[in-house]
Image (spheres, grey):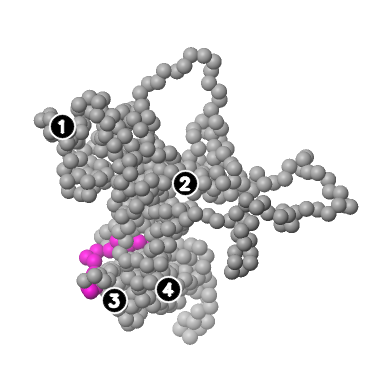
Amino acid sequence: MTTQTFELPDLGEGLTEAEVVRWLVAVGDTVAVDQPIAEVETAKSIVEVPTPFAGTVSVLHGGEGEVMEVGKPLISIAADAPGGADGAADAPAAREAGAPVSAEGERYREEERAGSGNVLIGYGTPDDGRTAGRRRRPRARPAGPAAPPAPATGGTGRPPLVTSPLVRQMAREAGLRISEVAGSGPGGLITRRDVAAAIEASRAPDLATVTPIDPGRPVATESASAPDAGDPRAEVDARTGLAESRRTPMNGFRKSVAASLSRSRSEIPEATVWVDVDATELVRLRESDPSGPGLLSYVARFVLAGLRAHPELNGLVDTERGELVQYDGVNLGLAVQTDRGLVAPAVLGAHRLTTLELDGEIRRLTAAAREGRATPAEMTGGTFTLNNYGSLRVDGSAAIINHPQVAILGIGRIIDRPWVVDGELTVRKVTQLSFAFDHRVCDGGVAAGFMRVVADAMENPAGAIARL
């Protein structure tokens, strides 16, 4: 029996670590080539990791919630026979012995030679229409009394649905059992808000056990009591003289965000311009067809028109070769606020889509990003970013460019404001566009030209769409 160990691969994002969110198999399970074995969370998204080997799971090299390094053992699988459980043999051993190698095994070897040697089957491989399901070996039940009741599952009969390790950590630090938290998300998904509500409920005092206060005796409060010497809150910051109430380790996602934003600020000489836009006609167009594309889809379409007119804003700066690069096509990034933080997945090939198709992709992509299901290509392939911070009920922002991109456009909330039309003061639907750009790729004239393309189209959307 041959045991093969699959190491945690680079998931195509250049990251060095990932956290095991959930194992999809257990020791003793039989697995097939390309079958998902675990869900892992990187700094970009949550992805399923398929196995390149077939056989019986012998070792899981990490627990759920554990952060593992790329290149370290993830799972060990024992082949039941020289051909493996599904005929997928260990290709190198079979080749040396002169034994035939299965098609799946040969495909893995070819991909391994073409890549880094740690190939993730199922990413960029042909879809042959087969689905590898989980096949669990039957296990004998011990004789004796019935097993004790299973842990609480919120009344659903299923294990608690949690996709974010941050939510589990939040519950764990508060001393809550995640299985006792009711989920309000889709399908019973437990969110940060649910855990926060449960924490707040657990802190409510039990009136039946409150000891009456003796008016003749001083009341001790938490703030007045001396902190425990072993409590990290007892540490005093030398600069401010204040006690530290809490220290929280930065997770992989926050580290990645910090590194990206810091690099953007240190490398890109950015400038910002902004303009107020009368979006009254755009709002009327949207309201005329409630089932049609959303406002952001129209703005996205106008952004694509602006990038066609000023393609230097859809590229990057190659500092090593001293060249300005422009892309033949647009992967339109969208800033999306999630439970994990702010991410910017991209609508791939947005320049090829109609306004209606853009609307469908924007809705699908934002939902996938919030669930941590956006693909690595979507999370890293953006060429220009559109940030709708109006959804956060703010009017403007000096956004940070998403390195290595060279520009980002933000749109604020649309509100009623006094506006002069044909010399008359009236009330209009007004929003603010703010645009940050890399001064290395263009000057203010180009940035202003791009802004006017977008702003003019928003003020006269019917005419703009007719010309697109």
Is 7 placed left or right of 371 in the picture?
left
Residue type at mark 3 is Val
Residue hosting label 1: 94
* Residue 335 in view: no
Picture layout, residue 228 above or below residue 468: above
Q: Tag 4 or tag 3, which sits nearer the N-term?
A: 4
Disc 4, SS: strand
Residue type at mark 2 is Pro
Q: Tag 2 or tag 1, which sits nearer the N-term?
A: 1
| Residues under numbered marks 1 and 2 in contact, where contact means CB atoms less than 8 Å apart | no
Q: Tag 4 or tag 2, which sits nearer the N-term?
A: 2
Residue type at mark 4 is Ser
Residue hosting label 4: 434
Comparing labels 2 and 4, the label whose residue is closer to the camera: 2
Residue hosting label 3: 441
Q: Residue 76: x, y in percent?
A: 31, 34
Comparing labels 1 and 2, the label whose residue is closer to the camera: 1
- Magenta residues, start to end: 322-335
The answer to which quarter of the image holds residue 4 is top left
Using the numbered discs, state the Cα–Cα distance from disc 3 to disc 1 in whole angstroms.
54 Å
Residue type at mark 1 is Ala
Residue hosting label 2: 165
Asked if residue 458 lies in the magenta stretch, the reply is no
Using the numbered discs, state the Cα–Cα distance from disc 4 to disc 1 in whole angstroms.
61 Å
Identify the residue shown where x is 35% and y is 79%. 448
Identify the residue shown where x is 29% and y is 52%. 12
How packed mark 3 is, by other alpha carbons closer than 10 Å (few <14, some 14-19, many 20 or more), is some
Q: Tag 1 or tag 3, which sits nearer the N-term?
A: 1
Identify the residue shown where x is 43% and y is 70%. 399
Quarter in which the C terminus is drawn: bottom left
